[in-house]
Image (cartoon, grey):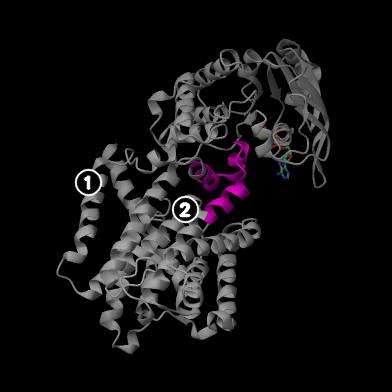
Amino acid sequence: MEALKNAFDFSDQPRLDMTIAGAVGTLFLIFPLLPLSAFALATMIQFFIFSLYGMGWNTIGGYGGQVDLGKAQYVGIGAYTTAVLLIRWDIPFWFSMPIGVVFAVTWSFIIGYPLFRLKGHYFAIATIATSLVLKDLFEVWEFVGAARGLEISPIEYVPPDFLRLIFKEDIYYYYVIFVFFLAGLLFLNWFRKSRLGYQLRAIKDNEDVARSLGINVHWAKIKTYAIATAYVSVVGSFHACYIKAIEPEDTMSLDISILIALMAMLGGAGSLWGPIIGAGILIPLKSYLKEWLGGMSGLAGMDLILYAVIIMVISAKEPRGVWGIVERIRRRKRT
Amino acid sequence: MALLEVDNLVKDFGGLRANDGISFQLEPGELLGLIGPNGAGKTTLFNCIAGKHPVTSGKIVFDGEDITALRAPEVARRGLARTFQVYAASGDLTVRENVMVGCFMRTPSRRKAGEKADTILADLNLMAAADQHVSELPVAAQKKVTMATALGTQPKLLLLDEVAAGLNPGEIEEIMASIRHIHHQLGVTVILIEHVMELVMRTSDRLIVLDYGRKIAEGLPDEIARDPQVIKAYLGDRYVKEHGGEVG
Ligand SMILES: Nc1ncnc2c1ncn2[C@@H]1O[C@H](COP(=O)(O)OP(=O)(O)OP(=O)(O)O)[C@@H](O)[C@H]1O
Ligand SMILES: [Mg+2]
């Protein structure tokens, strides 16, 4: 009960922020009704998807300071669970999604337990490695279609199918993921103020001090990693129904992992709005860049160059991202 | 029954014996001063008692329970809290949030942790700074925040490692007032490591002196101030021969 109240309690946020959030939220609500292109709608769906990935990343990576570059493996577990269960046994999304979470969280325990003994860069590198191993495994695993991947054939269903999340028009997907987005935001708002959230921030700051305050550092990280994993897996399941064709190369690539981490860091790691701001900047940029430059094959690597530039600017100028700049300006105004 | 019993504690770092057979007892309600020259092994002793370092040999009994093999979080949950010599509270969190981290050890409820934190902040005169970020505060206030955070875990015994180091006389008075409040009003037993001799002498019920990892003296403050071995440890042989003075 108290947890639910805390999730809806944004009273510690400045009024200006809540006004802007309300306005933007309203815009999101009516967005599909505006006379915009299908491309714009698809970009918005990507924005919500990556915002949610970023929120998940933010729990362990932002509040916990454990830089995770292997989120794609959980996108894969969620997406594959939902696709396999639907295609083989006609098990709908709302059942397969929680099953996917169970698989993903179990996997996160198995790798989190040893990985959280590692520190700093070693942890980041190890997450990349496990993600790549899982991807390689899926590429040769016939049961899940190996490198060809899986395809959900919409002809077999009668859209709009809310149970299986099979729709013809993107507008349905838009509102489903929008609801997930709101739920994810509320959960993050609860998390950052929860006991675990506080403990994690203490851990990020100084592990010895955290231990002296009765915090089981290893277990707190594992629990938070499981939460981060659940976010990503749920959205991975959604992704499978939305895209309808998944293959290891797309779903579980290192690019996705890096993009998730980068977005959250660009927006502001360890802040409530950071991942959303990061996704709001990078996703449209990426998708329109691709659209404009797509024809010019010589410029195919543009987005990678863009990422590199962003990483350099963040690490040199403002490690706390866009939100760090906002807070700096605010503090200066107060004093 | 003693609240804390340390029996023949030894701690080696490679070839270095940082604690060499230290034994002492602490009664509930005492304020024990722990002094000694730089590198004497005071912080190491805290680290061993609080479970940060595994001990090489010896035994530590807290509140009737053998805690020698327990790790730091378990020791904390049994009611033994500490501050760190080289740590100011988390600059990322506000003062209240810092203290709440401590309070969360006893309750999962944010409301209860917040209420408890506010009581402690009021006790230590920190209420005015509750919503400020710790990095914005002067060092003296930061040190008080680390004490408040440790108090949040509702300890029976609090180990304070040089909370007055680097403060000016006015700030030292303020910290001392807080320590006395914690000891008298809140009834917490305290062990105090301090280099500011005047502070320990005035505040402690009893003193223990370490030198090169060994306990070289134990007793009332004015006994310790006259103890030739203590004077030697602090000022060196030559000074004692020439002056035979007191540490004060
Ligand atoms: N983690 C460690 N690893 C190796 N040696 C250590 C470690 N911690 C302390 N030492 C050594 O143990 C000895 C005692 O150090 P300790 O920090 O306990 O002294 P102290 O009495 O607290 O000194 P100070 O008054 O300067 O704080 C020193 O020689 C120190 O270099
Ligand atoms: Mg020390």
Crowd rating for badge 1 (residues with CA inside 10 Å; few <14, some 14–19, many 20+) = few
Instruction: Identify which amino acid the numbered label 2 is placed on.
Output: Thr
Residue B195, position in %: x, y? 64, 25
Evaluate whether label 2 is on the same chain as label 1.
Answer: yes
The residue closer to the viewer here, B203 or B132, is B132
Residue B179 visible within the image: yes
Q: Residue at x 50, y 78 (%)?
A: A248
Residue B236 falls in image quadrant? top right
Instruction: Identify which amino acid the numbered label 1 is placed on.
Output: Thr
Residue beneath label 1, please? A19
Residue A217 among those drawn in magenta = yes
Report the magenta stretch's main SS: helix
Q: Which residue is drawn at 44% across and 31% down?
A: B111
Q: Residue A59 carries which label?
A: 2
Disc 2 chain ID: A
- Magenta segment, which residues? A198-226
The residue closer to the viewer here, B178 or B227, is B178
Residue with the most extreme left position: A35
Disc 1 chain ID: A
Query: SS at mark 1?
Result: helix
Residue B248, position in %: x, y? 67, 15
The N terminus of chain B appears in which quarter of the rendering?
Answer: top right
User: What is the CA distance from the residue labelled 2 to the residue labelled 1?
Assistant: 24 Å
The residue closer to the viewer here, B248 or B67, is B67
Kindly indicate whether the residue at mark 1 contacts the one at mark 2 (C-beta within 8 angstroms). Answer: no
Residue B105 falls in image quadrant? top right
